[in-house]
Amino acid sequence: VLFRSLTSNGVNFHIIDEAIMANHAYVEGDSLVVGKCKYNVVMLPPKVSTMDKTSEELLREYSSKGGKFCVTEETPTYLEGKKFNHDYINKDVSIEEVIENNPTKMSPNPDIKFSLREDEKGNKFIYAVNIHDVEVDVTIECKGYTSFIHDGKVVSNKLHFDSYESKILYLSNAQVEEKKENNKLYLGNNFRV
């Protein structure tokens, strides 16, 4: 349920295990940094009842520097299998707040999965994919932007996806050209006046 809720609302997240945390994570300000990714909310998924000492130390430091947690159930009750009080892990942010604060919104459609990304030059884009065999029309909104660049053309935030189609949509504020009406009426080759 948690995974479906996040993905259907375009919330970017990574699943980080304790080995990755031990080898690649550190605290920077009020963020947890893992590799090249920086996180301002750490979400503890359901059924996390214990953690190892390295993770506990990192999360305690993260909390002490103002880091925020989204706890979907109860906080862990064990440290390396022994009863432990993780009282520094607060329910600072709800799952609803995580979704609400996400910069991208889409008209509800479980067939479209999307996420906000950055390319190597720092340009922001949305990767969106229709994961089913039906055509769908959606509206995607991104705070601070009014349009997208798709295949070199400025397009509005109202989009059509064919079955299994994916799109890379660069964020833009460029004016969308209005479609010109074609006022010609084609009557066929056999019509006589």
Image (spheres, rainbow, N blue to C red):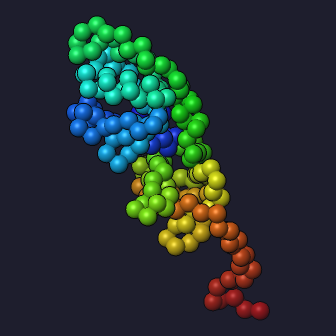
Quadrant holding the N terminus: top left
| Quarter residue 97 falls in | top right
Residue at (52% x, 23% y) in the render: 92
Report the residue at 33% width, 41% height from top: 34
Residue 76 position (above or below residue 172): above
**Viewer-side residue, 159 vs 54:** 54
Location of the C terminus (image quadrant): bottom right
Q: Does residue 43 appear anywhere in the picture? A: no
Up the image or down, 156 lies above or below 102; here it is: below
Q: Is residue 82 left or right of residue 77?
A: left
* Residue occupying image coordinates x 41% and y 55%: 164
Q: Position of residue 186 (x, y in %)?
A: 68, 83
Question: Can you give x and y, in whole percent of width and height, for residue 102 in the image?
Answer: 55, 41
Asked whether the viewer can see residue 102, the reply is yes
Q: Nearer the viewer, residue 138 or 44?
A: 44
State the residue at coordinates (34%, 19%). Answer: 47
- Where residue 32 sits, quadrant-wise, is top left
- Left or right: 111 in relation to 23: right
Q: Position of residue 52 (x, y in %)?
A: 25, 22
- Please determine whether, in this image, residue 93 is positioned above or below residue 106: above
